[in-house]
Image: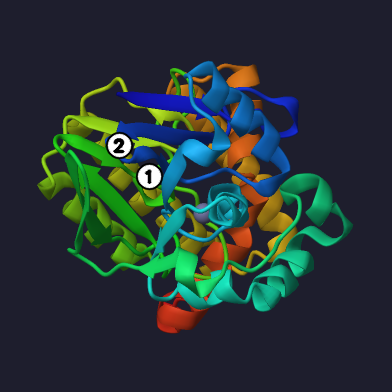
Amino acid sequence: MIHVLDTRHLGKRGIIATTALETNDGIALFDTGPESTFDNVVAELQRIGASAEDVRHVFVSHIHFDHAGAAWRFAELGATVYVHPRGAPHLIDPAKLVESATRIFGADMDRLWGRVAPIAREHLRVVEDQEVVRVAPFDIRVTETTGHATHHHVYNWDDVLFGGDVAGVRLGKGPPIPPFVPPELHVESWLDSIDKMRTLGAADLYLPHFGRVTDSLDAHFDALEQRVRDWSTWFRDRIRAGADEQELIPAFAEFEHADLRGGGADQSLVDGYESADPSYMAVGAAMRYWRKFHPAEISAAPAR
Ligand SMILES: [Zn+2]
């Protein structure tokens, strides 16, 4: 039995989910939401007849605070936290993570994400690409899926896939969009990851933002791939034309919102997408990506 638990982050429904799987060894949680919503998740666990202590396994897609921020709370209660090799050092010692997040969120850190504390090594299990973790009666397969972050995994069992952020943000009846965030956006890796997810042959996909995808997964991944390509190209052309960050922030918001409306989102859903994945984050991410990996493609076109 799988349950989508709403963290009600900042009082909003349908933005950040954690996914609970009932196993023979308690609850396996896929992502935890931020620490600031821990109490809401505990209330959601009670709604399904479980307690915080029943969570024995925590699989994090990646270590961003909206996904793994509350992992240390469950570890304190005895859960094992499964994480990518590149994510593990930051869960053991979160100092650098806090420092870089504070650069982005400043004084808002605590209100947005809550408290951060280290996870004891004995509660952490580093898992590698293609490893299978037995949590009876399930065999949970780990697949490394970079592009959104270098420390990202998706997890699948039976015909179910837990997708993390690399599988897209998709709210309500809106379309899937790729959350471009600094500093690790890598377009080619993202496209490879979409191919990897396609080959897992899942029938059901669960997203942290938000819940079970009701569309066919082929259609979902096709639409996601198209946006990874279109959005990165949109940025390339404007960066090449000399646009700076201050111009790109409102221009991209306008572009993205039009894209969302074209995909069936109304204004309140567009606002929801901004909460789940603020459009301004894509600007810094894309500028860094093009400058670092393809500087020649954004240098001014030669005169003809
Ligand atoms: Zn993320």
Q: Amino acid at mark 2?
A: Ala
Tell me the colour scheme of the image.
rainbow
Tell me residue 114's x, y (percent): 76, 50
Residue ID at (66%, 56%): 248
Toward the viewer: 168 or 239?
168
Q: In what element is the residue under mark 1?
A: helix
Is the CB–ligand 1 distance for label 2 below 8 Å? Answer: no
| Mark 1 Cα-neighbour bin, 10 Å: few <14, some 14–19, many ≥20 | many
Q: Is residue 82 left or right of residue 87?
A: left
Q: Does 224 appear above or below 270?
A: below
Q: Tell which residue pokes out farthest to the right in this image.
A: 107
- Give residue 213's quadrant in the image: top left
Please indicate whether residue 124 sits to the left or right of residue 189 in the image.
Answer: right
Find disc 2 in the rendering and name its residue. 223
Q: Residue at x 16, y 37 (%)?
A: 202
Instruction: Name which residue lies at 66% across and 39% down.
Output: 38
Q: Position of residue 41 (x, y in %)?
A: 60, 32
Vertical side of 217 occupied by 180: above or below: below
Measuring 34% from the left and 44% from the top, which residue is drawn there? 163
Q: Is residue 231 depicted above or below 237 in this figure?
A: above
Residue placed under numbered mark 1 in the picture:
227
Q: Quadrant of the N terminus?
A: top left
Tell me the amino acid under the disc marked 1: Arg
State the image quarter where residue 148 is shown: bottom left
**Quick check: marks 1 and 2 in contact, CB under 8 Å?**
yes
Residue 74 in view here: yes
**Marker disc for residue 171:** none
Closest to the observer, 186 or 58? 58
3D distance between C-alphas at marks 1 and 2: 6 Å
Question: Which quadrant holds the C terminus?
Answer: bottom left
CA neighbours of label 2 inside 10 A, class few (<14), some (14 to 19), many (20+): some
The picture places residue 166, in percent across and down from the top left corner, at 38, 51
